[in-house]
Amino acid sequence: MASGRRWLPVTVAVVVGLAVIAGSYLYVRLDTDRSDCVALGMVSSTEKNDLVAELAGRYNKSGRRFGGQCANVTVAGLNSGQAMEALAGDWATVAGGIPKPQVWLPTSSLWTGQLQLRDRAAKRPEQTPGEYPSIANSPLVIAMPATKARVLQQRGELGWGDILGLSGDEGWAAFGKPEWKRFTFGKDNPRLSTSGLAATIATYYAATGTSSDLIDADVRAPQVTQFVRRIEANVSHYSDDVVDLLKSLAAADLSPVDEGESDLSAVVTQEELVYLYNEGQLSPRTADKPGEKPHEPLVALYPKEGTFNLDHPYVVLPGASTAQQKAAADFLAFLQESPQQRAFAGLGFRDHQQVASAELTKVVGGHETDKRPYFKPPSPTVVQGILDSWSTLRKKANILMTIDVSGSMTNQVRSKTRLEMATEAAKKGLALLNSADQVGLWSFSSEKQGSSAAPYQQQVPLSRLDLGHFSDRLSGLRPGGATALYTTIRAAHSYMLDHYDRTRINAVVVLTDGENEYARDNKLANLLKDVALDPDRPVKIFCIAFDKGSDLATLEAIAKAASGKAFDARDPQLIDDAFVKLLSSF
């Protein structure tokens, strides 16, 4: 009997071992054979789509099941405003090759409200009629270099107007720092960006002294519009992506003094981006060198009136089937579990219940931020009224547009020449501007042989925008010659300094399909020195590289020197989108 008992554990071990092997086989079979899984497509806002895609991969490999089924989750990234417009219209046309999703993950519920308006106007069922759970949260903050933030913090708690409404002329002199000169801040265009939209709404709340129940009459009140106009007057320029503003700020911070400078005193952005900035995630990097932490970190300031929380809602769209709805519910539960929430915290997000980690609080400024009040989002109709009002209150622009008319612009792109495509895109983009904006037009190529004339010609003088006349002059451009890129940019920059207007955004726009071909002026280093940003009189340069012959790296260097931006439209089919983003900077 004793001998039989000695064999019993061995027998049990064998049986258990076989069961483990069978279970492992079953797990592997379920994990590898996913042909019966429910396909669930998602579109996420771009600041988190890489993380959500990574978590979706983790979910797909987990062997997880719900009601006997599994799901295969795929994730694509799309700007929240663009995704809203796509859902409101022809998805394929607006979103390109991205399949229409069953789940939408915008940055804020502000966009679900705007989609409601579009659906009501079209007299169709609302796609986003309710409130939605969050997968992460991030408050809107005013980010400022630590040295400047400390000066403000010595005054105690300050509001939106106290910080962003500093006089552009008196600027830092009001705080005993005249050597810091003007106060300007960076902000996204509210029609394209969540942080820009939330920042604009926040200024209206600050102007009324309320944190909820904003109504249309408040938006139109004279004292409110005056308050908003005072803040908008200090905008450096309107970005299409606040990440680009922060990357430029990080590059200037890490550059030698004579190679990079910024005119920005502050940036209105999400708290999580301040975290990424301070951790070096937005700093310049190469394949073999990770981003360095900036020499001077940013501090997140939370205005005393309150701020917006960007709630990152999880929106299951009505096109989802019953099985996809169940799959979406299971993936939401997965995202809200602790391991996945830690992954969000690793990017600087608060968790789905708005709780900030100790590390986040430390990195963004060391303040107890969880008790700050949040504004309640106004109704979608009030938000639309704010956007309409902002169009007239925003800072106006002083723009000199220079267009390459060299011989290569005659090359065909499908049924049109490059020049025809470029001028048509420019006309569409110009429609985004205000009639109070001032815009001039130069064309450039190279001077005719034996001529003493400059290789650039004025087509429209710098003046209030007359869209019809400007469009006619664009249509009348004729190509020929080589590309006198450097000398044109230098002359245009000098012209804008001569016509500088401190009440406006002053900028040069350059569109070219090639590289510099002008032997008389071919030293890039000299050009970069000549157009380097003067923070007290900034003239920014924005470039569009149009066609594969464009020297994008050089255009990026020129734009960086002048604290502007270069847009990549080397695929000519992207030219419309590039012009919309560029002219949304004004």
Image: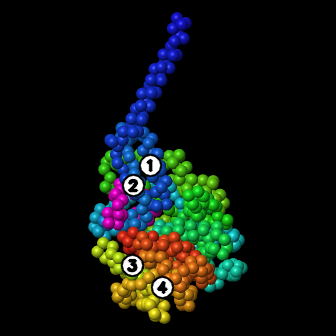
**Residue 65 location in percent, x, y?**
40, 40
The residue at the point 35 percent across, 63 percent down is 96
| Residue in front for this viewpoint, 320 or 540 | 540
Residue 508 at what x, y percent from top left? 50, 82
- Residue at the location (48% across, 71% down)? 552
Give the residue type at disc 2: Met
For the point 32% across and 41% down, the residue is 36
Residue 56: mark in rendering: 1
Furthest toward the front, the residue is 450
Q: Quadrant of residue 544?
A: bottom left
Is 555 part of what is drawn in magenta? no
- Residue 580 lies left or right of residue 542; in this view the side is left
User: For mark 2, does the 10 Å Cα neighbourhood hold few (<14), some (14 to 19), or many (20 or more) residues?
Assistant: many
The Cα–Cα distance between marks 4 and 2, rounded to whole angstroms, is 41 Å
* Of the image marks 3 and 4, the number of the one nearer the N terminus: 4
Residue 42's disc is 2
**Residue that mark 3 sits on:** 408
Residue that mark 4 sits on: 400
Q: Is residue 449 visible?
A: yes
284 up-or-down from 545: above or below: above
Residue 401 is situated, as x and y percent measured from the top left of the image, at 45, 83
The reply to whether callout 4 and callout 2 are in contact (CB within 8 Å) is: no
Residue stretch rendered in magenta on the structure: 91-112
Helix, strand or loop at mark 4: strand
Q: Are marks 1 and 4 in contact (CB under 8 Å)?
A: no
The reply to whether callout 2 and callout 1 are in contact (CB within 8 Å) is yes
Q: Quadrant of residue 64?
A: top left
